[in-house]
Amino acid sequence: MNDSSGDAIRPAPRVRRTFEEVALQLRAMFTEGHLNPGDRLPPERELSQQLGVSRSALREALRTLEISGVIELRKGRNGGAFITQGNLEAVTANFRDLLTFGNLKFEELAEARTWLAEIVVRVACERATDEDLDALEVNVLEAERMLAEGRHAEKIDLNIEFHNLLARATRNPVLAMNVRTMSDVMHGFADRYDERTDFGLPERRRLIAALRARDSERATRELLDVMSRWHRYIYTMLLAAPPREIGLKAARA
């Protein structure tokens, strides 16, 4: 008799369901260049025959890809399943869900956002053009005007967009996409902040001046200072209210 007491117990391999296999096949078609952004997939009946699966399995696969932001399902006479250009909102929604249900802590998000911001500022200090810096100046001018006119929601939008403009100045789309995702998540918290002050605007002006001087140390210091204060305020607010309640309100923003 063989003694198998020392053998490791291995879990049985997970068997993919039909709709998961279909989703993988469709993703392979996208990545291999058989389908491009903007293309419409064949009609449901034709596609199910091509893939050799039921229409119900195909529908479930398409819904999965829609949730992932890979395709867009449009209704109407000219509707169908279309390949998207990529949907960052799907990534943002996942982050919001993780915050809402406590799988991700706000302080973890804030920490990662701070690290990312430092990289962005240093790279932007090297690569930003005069046009990039002028766009940042215009953003701050508009934010000041919104504050003076009492248009606080629009001021919040401009404050968030400032970070996106700065990230685009790095000329690195991966950095820009990551900043955009985090900015969109933070927008839900920004809506709860008292934006009836010039908080962050003087620092942004000094940041732009440092970028024009190509002084990365000073530029980094200006941005991280205002971000640190803002993160502390939000964290204090979270401690004063049930985390799930805050998360749900942020998710709806």
Image (spheres, rainbow, N blue to C red):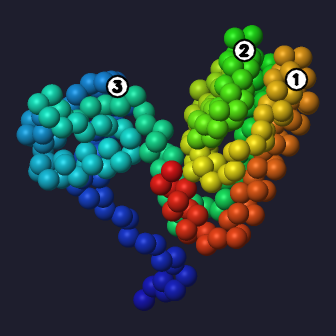
Q: Position of residue 47 (x, y in %)?
A: 14, 37
Question: Residue 37, which numbered label?
Answer: 3
Q: Which mark is residue 210?
A: 1
Q: Identify the mark nearer the N-term, 2 or 3.
A: 3
For residue 213, above or below residue 88? above
Counting residues from the N terminus, which is met first, the one under dot 3 or under dot 1?
3
Tag 2: amino acid:
Asp
Q: Is 141 displayed left or right of 53 in the figure?
A: right
Image side of residue 198 versus residue 41, left or right: right
* Residue 120 percent location from the top left of the image: 74, 31
Could you tell whether 32 is left or right of 203 in the image? left
| Residue sitting at x 50%, y 55% | 251
In the figure, 188 relative to 1: above or below? above
Amino acid carrying mark 1 in the image? Ala
Q: Secondary structure at mark 2?
A: helix
Above or below — where is 101 with respect to 58? below
Say which of marks 1 and 2 sits in front.
2
- For the N terminus, the image quarter is bottom left
Q: Mark 1, residues whose alpha carbon is within 10 Å: few (<14), some, or many (≥20)?
A: some
Image coordinates for residue 3, horizontal then vertical, percent: 49, 86
Sequence-wise, the earlier of marks 1 and 2 is 2
Res. 164 image quadrant:
top right
Which residue position holds label 2? 134
Q: CA distance from mark 3 to mark 1?
A: 40 Å
Mark 2 and mark 3: Cα distance apart in space: 32 Å
